[in-house]
Amino acid sequence: MRDVIEIEQGYLPGRFTERLRRERHADGTIRLIRTLKTGRVSSAPRSETDVSPAVFDAVWPMTAGRRIRKRRTSVSFGTGQLEIDVFLDRTLVLAELEVERVDDVVDLPHWILDVLVAEVTDDPSYSNARLAQPEIV
């Protein structure tokens, strides 16, 4: 199965990682989501809530300068799900595989191994929140 979603994601200033996200699905549906993460690691507790267009439009301007745009393709393989993000606002492609446990053995499909450049799981500079920060000159 393959699903493609256009994503605009903006981060709010503050102590916790809080983001707004607009998802445009291939079937035309749009989902507006507010996410709050209470930790810095990807496994940190998070809360996701759908928000109304009025709330999204009121809060979205507060994310100015802290946004990313990407096209996500989800691909099933074996028992896994691979999410491939092609960033639309920079030259970057990331692939993410969700696993049950960090020590799970993963057999990636050959087509991803052919183009894989680096393993960035533990590199915080590739987190969406970091990618959304303004460039430091």
Image (tube, helix red, strand yellow):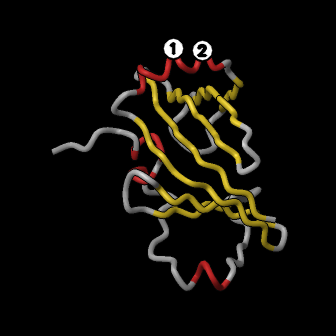
Rendered residue at 40%/22% (across/down): 13
Q: What residue does disc 1 label?
A: 58
Q: Is residue 75 above or below residue 109?
A: above
The disc at residue 97 is: none
Q: What residue does disc 2 label?
A: 55
96 left or right, relative to 115: right
| Label 1 Cα neighbours within 10 Å, binned few <14 / some 14-19 / many ≥20 | few
Instruction: Give the amino acid at mark 1.
Output: Ala
Q: Quadrant of the N terminus?
A: bottom right
Q: Is residue 35 above or below residue 126?
A: above
Q: Is residue 40 above or below residue 83?
A: above
Residue lying farthest to the front in this orientation = 28
Give whichever of 45, 35 is nearer the camera.
Answer: 35
Residues at marks 1 and 2, CA–CA distance in whole angstroms: 5 Å
Rendered residue at 72%/73% (across/down): 105
Could you say which quadrant of the image residue 50 lies in? top right
| Label 2 Cα neighbours within 10 Å, binned few <14 / some 14-19 / many ≥20 | few
Q: Is residue 8 above or below residue 81?
A: above
Instruction: Give the amino acid at mark 2.
Output: Val
Q: Are marks 1 and 2 in contact (CB under 8 Å)?
A: yes
